[in-house]
Amino acid sequence: MAVRLLIPIAALVAAWGYLSVWVPHPVAGLKVLGVDLLTFCKLFTGAQIAWPWQNPVFFVLPLATASLTLSQLGWFADAPGHWHRAIVWSVRLALWIASLYVALQILPLDWKPSNLLWTSNLLQTAGFAFCTGCALLSPLTAPTLTARARWWLPPAALAAATAHAAFLVAYLPEFTRLYRQPLLPGPGFYGMALGLAVLMVAAMVGRPRTITDLEWRNRR
């Protein structure tokens, strides 16, 4: 049970890491968050960041994985038997709200209806729509996705980790050149790595499943 409960916790840690500092700097305005890379991948030129690292898909995947995990795995059947039903549903609601908040971070910083379908913003718009749709439909989709989490969640977490590779290979060296000082990844970089690693292991070992109303009544 404890291993399975780690899944939404790990998703929250991964999301926290991505929304935290990846490029540290004494000056607050020069710190770069992981989510800021969704903007920088469009601001840097091809001469600065080589293809394919400019593709925003690398930086959409962490947010999409965290949002999808939070919205679907909130329906797991592993809450301790002594938990009151109201507490379980409160936790589910909190995870659902967190999933929507994480999905919202996928949108471009300058988003508005007139530019969401621009080529540069289309992937982010589609990612936001997909994650939001899954969250809204989670009572229907969660039974299937949760029961099969050990099959789709580890590959999704591994794909999200490509953001780390893109950052180390292309973006950190560029920020080092721009700031004219040696730079190491910030705490957010390691926080997201930890969250994704725990997510992969817990999904493979825990094998979460959803709970039906009949099962819940029998447990009560």
Image (tube, rainbow, N blue to C red):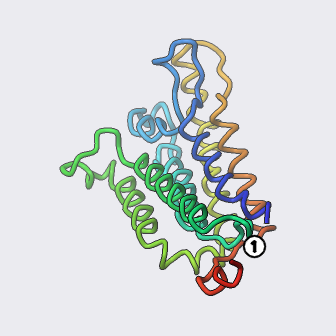
**Residue denoted by label 1:** 207
Image quadrant in which you'd find residue 41 = top left
Which one is nearer the viewer's eye here, 152 or 163? Answer: 152
Q: Position of residue 168 (x, y in %)?
A: 64, 36
Q: Position of residue 65 (x, y in %)?
A: 56, 58
Relative height, residue 10 to residue 50 (above, below) = below
Farthest left residue in view: 114
Image quadrant in which you'd find residue 5 = bottom right
Relative height, residue 184 to residue 6 (above, below) = above
Indicate the amino acid at tag 1. Answer: Arg
SS at mark 1? loop
State left or right for residue 170 relative to residue 40.
right
What residue is rendered at 50% in x and 45% in y? 51
Residue 64 seen: no
State left or right for residue 91 relative to residue 39.
right
Residue 114 seen: yes
Q: Position of residue 30 (x, y in %)?
A: 49, 19
Q: Position of residue 139 (x, y in %)?
A: 49, 75
Which one is nearer the viewer's eye here, 199 or 44? Answer: 199
What residue is rendered at 58% in x and 26% in y? 23
What residue is rendered at 71% in x and 72% in y? 208
What is the crowding at mark 1: few (fewer than 14 residues within 10 Å), some, or many (at least 20)?
some
What residue is rendered at 70% in x and 44% in y? 193
State left or right for residue 16 relative to residue 81.
left
Check the picture and name the quadrant holding the N terminus: bottom right
Farthest bottom residue in view: 214
Which one is nearer the viewer's eye here, 22 or 202? Answer: 202
